[in-house]
Image (tube, rainbow, N blue to C red):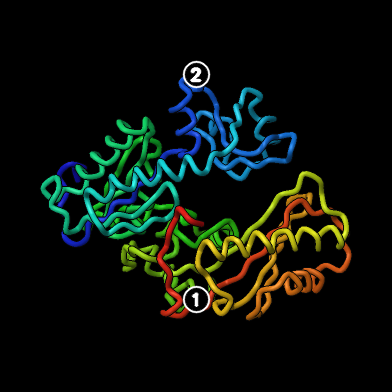
């Protein structure tokens, strides 16, 4: 079907995603960086990690969450800039004002992406593709950065569409096109299928959505747990999730990568106390009180990059409880630790619903 002549029978949902947001902002403000590999993150000599990188850098195999040291080894000309989170937040707020011109139904996913329900919008004669084009043009004109967009009748398909044509492009799939479109999408593009589940799928000779159609919903539940029920619908392009103006915060956490590895329990305990104070400050910012705590958890990354997480039922936040959780799982530090993280999950009650604010996390 012609991309410019689609028939929209139900909802019209746009997914907008800024292209390498942090790096793009830095390049827009520093013209001499144009056409050069640029990343935002920590310093290589301080065990930094990349937050993002532009598409030129990605040609070298560089990606977010990669260590800065490894990134430099892949591209000696890579320019790594420190993150200026406050600047990115300010620009993000202004970009979201553009979205609000077209709809009040906006669900922020992160600082640089959102779902926008334009089903009832009368702008552009109700054409969601024209709306997405205008939004992207405004972002480029006002902020000198590019964005990609996906348009469809549900969140799942619109998200897949925005990823499909990155960077600086858009793609749309209307209701009638969804069944043929989704069957040829790789399973690792479906939310919830990460590296572990995708490996499980490939071991079962499943790589695309259509390869999973032979399994019933009950069989998928046996394979993937409760998520199998959602997966049964997703692989058929069915997604009934609404665009939410507010979201339920599921957890709050903090973590830190250390300049020097931790090699003793005393060193770890000291860092846990430091992280606990950071966690309490984050709770104040998010207006989350102690009576919302469901369980606490720790994250440990060793110097070989192996990562483990452990959790425990708990209704009281204290540094002692996190230290106890750590010691219950590691009594002696046999392998040096490069990162520690602590946090807690929040009770899922309607009265615990808080306004989701991507600018105050």
| Mark 1 element type | loop
Q: Is residue 342 visible?
A: yes
Q: Which mark is residue 56?
A: none
Depth order, front residue of 53/89? 89
Residue 208: x %, y % from top left: 44, 55
Q: Quadrant of residue 19?
A: top left
**Which residue sits at x=10%, y=48%?**
125
**Which residue sits at x=51%, y=28%?**
56
**Sequence order check: which comes first, mark 2 or mark 1?**
2
Q: Which mark is residue 32?
A: 2
Q: Which residue is mark 1?
A: 226
34 in relation to 181, above or below = above
142 in relation to 110, above or below = above
Residue 341: x %, y % from top left: 68, 60
Left or right? Give the position of 349 relative to 43: left
Q: Quadrant of residue 46?
A: top right
């Amino acid at each position: 079907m012609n991309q410019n002549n689609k028939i929209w029978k139900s909802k019209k949902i746009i997914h907008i995603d800024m292209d390498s947001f942090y790096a793009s902002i830095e390049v827009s403000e520093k013209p001499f960086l144009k056409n050069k590999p640029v990343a935002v993150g920590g310093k290589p000599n301080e065990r930094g990690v990349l937050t993002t990188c532009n598409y030129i850098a990605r040609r070298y195999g560089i990606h977010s969450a990669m260590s800065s040291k490894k990134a430099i080894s892949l591209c000696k000309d890579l320019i790594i800039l420190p993150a200026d989170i406050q600047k990115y937040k300010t620009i993000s707020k202004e970009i979201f004002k553009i979205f609000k011109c077209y709809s009040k139904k906006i669900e922020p996913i992160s600082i640089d992406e959102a779902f926008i329900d334009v089903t009832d919008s009368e702008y552009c004669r109700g054409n969601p593709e024209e709306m997405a084009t205008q939004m992207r043009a405004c972002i480029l004109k006002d902020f000198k950065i590019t964005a990609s967009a996906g348009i469809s009748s549900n969140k799942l398909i619109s998200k897949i569409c925005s990823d499909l044509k990155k960077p600086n492009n858009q793609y749309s799939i209307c209701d009638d096109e969804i069944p043929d479109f989704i069957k040829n999408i790789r399973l690792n593009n479906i939310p919830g299928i990460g590296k572990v589940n995708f490996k499980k799928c490939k071991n079962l000779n499943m790589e695309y959505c259509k390869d999973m159609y032979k399994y019933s919903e009950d069989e998928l539940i046996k394979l993937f747990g409760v998520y199998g029920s959602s997966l049964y619908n997703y692989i058929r392009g069915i997604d009934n999730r609404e665009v939410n103006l507010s979201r339920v915060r599921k957890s709050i956490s903090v973590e830190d990568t250390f300049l020097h590895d931790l090699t003793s329990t005393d060193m770890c305990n000291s860092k846990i106390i430091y992280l606990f104070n950071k966690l309490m400050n984050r709770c104040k910012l998010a207006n989350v009180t102690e009576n919302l705590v469901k369980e606490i958890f720790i994250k440990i990354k060793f110097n070989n990059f192996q990562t483990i997480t452990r959790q425990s039922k708990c209704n009281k936040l204290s540094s002692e409880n996190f230290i106890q959780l750590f010691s219950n799982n590691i009594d002696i530090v046999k392998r040096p630790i490069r990162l520690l993280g602590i946090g807690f999950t929040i009770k899922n009650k309607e009265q615990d619903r808080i306004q989701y604010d991507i600018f105050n996390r």
